[in-house]
Image (cartoon, rainbow, N blue to C red):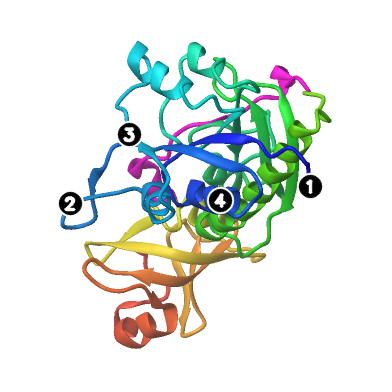
Amino acid sequence: MSTSPLSIIFAGTPEFAAVALAALIDSPHHVVAVYTQPDRPSGRGLKVTASPVKQLALDHHLPVHQPVSLKEDDEQATLAAYHADVMVVAAYGMLLPSKVLRIPRLGCINIHPSILPRWRGAAPIQRALYAGDSETGVTIMQMSEGLDTGDILYTSKYMITPDDTSQTLHDKLARIGASACLATLDLLAENRITPIPQDNKLATYASKISKEEALIDWQQPALALEYEIRAFNPWPVAYTSWQGKNLRIWSAKALQQLHTVSARTILAASPEGLDIATGEGVLRILQVQLPGGKVISIADFYHAHHDKLIIGQHLL
């Protein structure tokens, strides 16, 4: 560990960022202030709630700032008054003006959950799964004025498993990101990092996920639908229609199986799975949820509705 701990301003909002903040608090470096999004209504009751980062910061008696913007001179002056060596940013949810990027002695660094330049943008975790990527990871990047275009300081890779969902991948990359951040700070403190410019020709964009995307198109190949279901777990959750209701699909597996029927056709139904014909191959549904109900196994769904699951009929 470096003999020269750094003074850090941390900026982040959700749980992904809180994991990194917790690691920084436990490190020899000094977190001098925390920036996070203003409290907003959340949950079914729309109760105004502090972000996970704010809650953690208050638990450790750290100064918390929640500006609506960092464009104003007085907000920038407040930030500059901390005389921080570096600002660590993780899922803050706010663009930093160019003036802010230059305030800390070592600038601002970002914990980004992809191997840049692949999957710049808002939803890198979901898009990696949706695309069927075999590998992802975390990049610690020197922040610039572009969208995730800054120089690469450190990368840590992760091989995606066949059972990873956006939730499991989020949790794993949060831990990887925290470790990568600490390693980067140690190297920065010792002046042992050579920034690597990104190759813009290799860049891909991770656009925000929309609820509209979650409607399953059964003409797609089974493997693509499996990727989609994993990418949209836990939000917005892929869904189809069944018995006039939206049936949310939380888990499914593509089968290497040929068929000669139209997409959406029920090929088999049992406690082991509900097999549906797709545009290419068969998708075995394993976990579902009906409106107002809990997430249940396909075995429970089958026992409750087996009389309506007619082989040869469409899922409609």
Front residue (pair 209, 32): 32
Give the residue at mark 1: 1
* Residue 164 in the figure: left or right of residue 69: right
Determine the image quadrant of residue 190. Answer: top right
Does 205 appear in magenta?
yes
Give the residue at mark 4: 25
Q: Looking at the picture, which amino acid does disc 3 mark?
A: Gln
Closer to the camera: disc 3 or disc 2? 3
Which residue is drawn at the image coordinates 78% and 36% (left, top)?
187
Q: Looking at the picture, which amino acid does disc 1 mark?
A: Met
Looking at the image, do the residues carrying marks 1 and 4 touch, with CB atoms under 8 Å apart? no
Closer to the camera: disc 1 or disc 3? 1
Looking at the image, do the residues carrying marks 2 and 4 touch, with CB atoms under 8 Å apart? no
* Residue 45 in the figure: left or right of residue 67: left
- Callout 4 secondary element: helix
- Callout 3 secondary element: loop
> Where is residue 45 drawn, in percent x and y?
15, 57
Report the magenta residues as a range. 196-217
Image disc number at residue 66: 3
Give the residue at mark 2: 46
Q: Mark 1 and mark 4: span between their CA atoms?
A: 15 Å
Q: Mark 2 and mark 4: span between their CA atoms?
A: 30 Å
> Where is residue 298 drawn, in percent x and y?
43, 78
